[in-house]
Amino acid sequence: MSTEKLNKKKTIDLRKKHIGPSCKIFFSHDPIKIIQAKGQYMYDETGQRYLDCINNVAHVGHCHPDVVKAGAQQMEQLNTNTRFLHDNLVLYAQKLQATLPDKLSVCYFVNSGSEANDLALRLARQYSGHKDIITLENAYHGHISSLIDISPYKFHQLSDAELNPFVHVAPSPDVYRGKYRADHFDPATAYADEVKDIIEKVHKKGGKIAAFIAESLQSCGGQVIPPAGYFQHVAEHVHKAGGLFIADEVQVGFGRVGTNFWAFQLQGEDFVPDIVTMGKPIGNGHPMSCVVTTKEVAEAFMSSGMEYFNTFGGNPVSCAIGLAVLDVIVKEDLQGNALRVGQHLTDLLEKQKEKHPLIGDIRGCGLFVGVELVRDRLTLTPATAEAQEVIYKLKEQHILLSADGPHRNVLKFKPPLCFTTEDAELVVEKIDLILTGILKYASVSCFDHETKYYFSLFFCHFVSFFVFL
């Protein structure tokens, strides 16, 4: 540990000098310097405590003592690569597999969600012998080249971006803002038919589908919950075309949804993906991840003749930490806590929706909740500036929340699973006060209705301008 302690300005100056300018930080106009964290709280260099509603990485709580102890003890004994036999690897694989359907029985350990999703594409292409991939609008699957190609969340903002000819984008199954909404008689089938149409177009051009990949719940895309039955219909179309279904659980797995351990299980017991990718919460902040698939897919991957090796993936320290995380989830009933606290949070937010016209939709499962802000509930005009104002005002109240989605107007709750009902009540109370303050600017008595609206709009954009400086 470095003995030198830097003041905040020096830290910022060194970051500007030595860290790539594309590496953005939260609250860039006035960033927070975090030096310590525990449970659902983070602390800055002055000792100020912040309630963390952002971190889906510190899954069982920041610096959980059981996880820290497991990692430290194993590091004192041995850390080496997986070309040597070690019990931690096989014991962890066994324990992880026990949380999944029997069909998903073969593990490949890697170091990040991006690595996991890249490997999943390789597995699918080797198994199928095909190249084409279907992804979803607003999807995010990772930062490496193969995944930027299948992450419209990243490339749709670039006006000159060229779509990889082997990548095809299907509509996001968003029943609030999407093509088929909650009032549609069967949105699951309608959205799945869009995937079927893409497959037919690919075949007409001589292509063949290797895989369909989707986050089990879209996170960066705006906390989108697919309608029940959607994955089953899509899997049927994809399998018929000779491809595989990849479920990306990097942000939403390990009990976050409350009712189930894995978010894909929300679709029903009759749905099992061919490949599942994991990351973020798996190591509670330690860099590890995993791809789990079937024996058939694993055997096809081996038949290529190319050995697969990952220097750090599945090392004894990572597996010791992973085992500790699984133990803590069970011991502290964190999946149950996610269900109970998440429901309480959603109930509180629904009451705010009745009070504040800016709240257009509340959706989520467990401690994965989105609040979409709109300026008009009929036209669904995104309240982007207002969402930014909310997260910056919350920061002033020492609460950390983020806004995301294609219009950056969805407040995202994805806190550590030790989040409490009291935490939920505090955040909603502060959001209520902030939205009330925004409403006051829109109700200046000397203006007519239209002028009030534009005054409010100007104010929010004024705030947003300084937010992004």
Image (cartoon, rainbow, N blue to C red):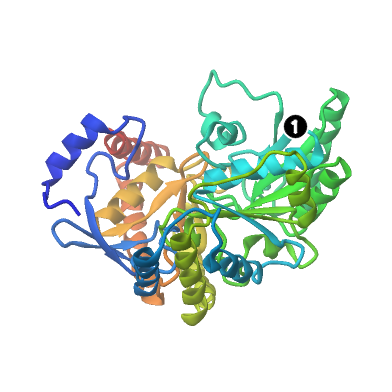
Q: Position of residue 123 (x, y in %)?
A: 70, 43
Q: Position of residue 307 (x, y in %)?
A: 66, 42
Question: Would residue 310 be found to the left or right of residue 61 on screen?
Answer: right
The residue nearer to you, when weighing 138 against 323, is 323
Question: Would residue 79 be found to the left or right of residue 250 on screen?
Answer: left
From what the image shows, is residue 268 above or below residue 35? below
The residue nearer to you, when weighing 94 against 207, is 94
How many labels sit on residues?
1
Quarter residue 171 falls in: top right
Q: Position of residue 19 (x, y in %)?
A: 28, 33
Extreme residue toward the top, this view: 160
Give the amino acid type for the residue marked by disc 1 in the picture. Lys
Quadrant of the image containing the C terminus: top left
From what the image shows, is residue 80 above or below residue 12? below
The residue nearer to you, when weighing 435 against 223, is 223
From what the image shows, is residue 245 above or below residue 326? above
Residue drawn at point x = 88 percent, y = 25 percent: 204
- Residue assigned mark 1: 131
Residue drawn at point x = 62 percent, y = 72 percent: 259
Residue drawn at point x = 43 percent, y = 69 percent: 60
